[in-house]
Amino acid sequence: MHLLALVPLVVGLVVAAVGVLGLRERLPRNRFGGVRTPATLRDDETFRVANKVAGLPIAVAGAVGIVSGAAGLVAGLAVTLVGLVGMCAIALAGGMLGHRAAEAMPAPAPELPEGCKGCVCGGCEIATALKGSVGADVTGVGGE
């Protein structure tokens, strides 16, 4: 019996749990679990959709890890290593699917400043552009 077979067994349990939570849309945005790329971390909705898309492949990767760890306890080290590599490859593919789903989602609309809520005049963009181009120092404007 090889104790190294416990590694994919334990890791597979964790990976399967993350996959199932993502698939059921119960995985909150966090620092540790799920598909974590700049695209998926854009907002809560994007994180939820990306992890839902990646949930099934990640849960399958966890199942592969659990089965290979259990079989590795009986069969040997080769089965354990093949299962560990398979688990990583399937989880990576699921993560790439989730990342692509996050990139396909439209970016959220920027929040308007307090004075411009509900107004569609376009004055806020003009004021921001002018403030950035002129700046605070206007001594050279008009010879004054």
Image (cartoon, rainbow, N blue to C red):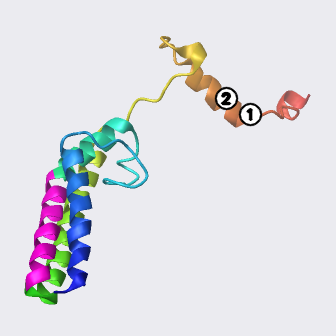
Question: Does 73 lie within the magenta span?
Answer: yes
Farthest residue in the top direction?
118
| Residue 64 sits in quarter | bottom left
Q: Are dots 2 and 1 in contact, CB under 8 Å?
A: yes
Measured from the top left, where is residue 18 in percent x and y? 26, 53
The rendered magenta stretch, by its main secondary structure, is classed as helix
When the figure is inspected, residue 77 is found, relative to residue 58, above or below; the finding is below
| Horizontal relation, residue 67 to residue 47: left or right | left
* Few, some or many residues within 10 Å of mark 1 (<14, 14–19, 20+): few
Residue at image point 26% right, 46% down? 50
Identity, as a three-letter code, of the amino acid under mark 2: Leu
Q: Which residue is mark 2?
A: 130
Measured from the top left, where is residue 75 in percent x and y? 8, 85
Residue at image point 28% right, 41% down? 48
Tell me the SS state at disc 2: helix
- Of residue 76 and residue 31, the one placed in the foreground of this image is 76
Measured from the top left, where is residue 57 in percent x and y? 15, 57
Residue at image point 23% right, 75% down? 6
Q: Which residue is mark 1?
A: 134
Residue at image point 84% right, 35% down? 137
Q: Which residues are magenta?
A: 56-74
Identity, as a three-letter code, of the amino acid under mark 1: Val
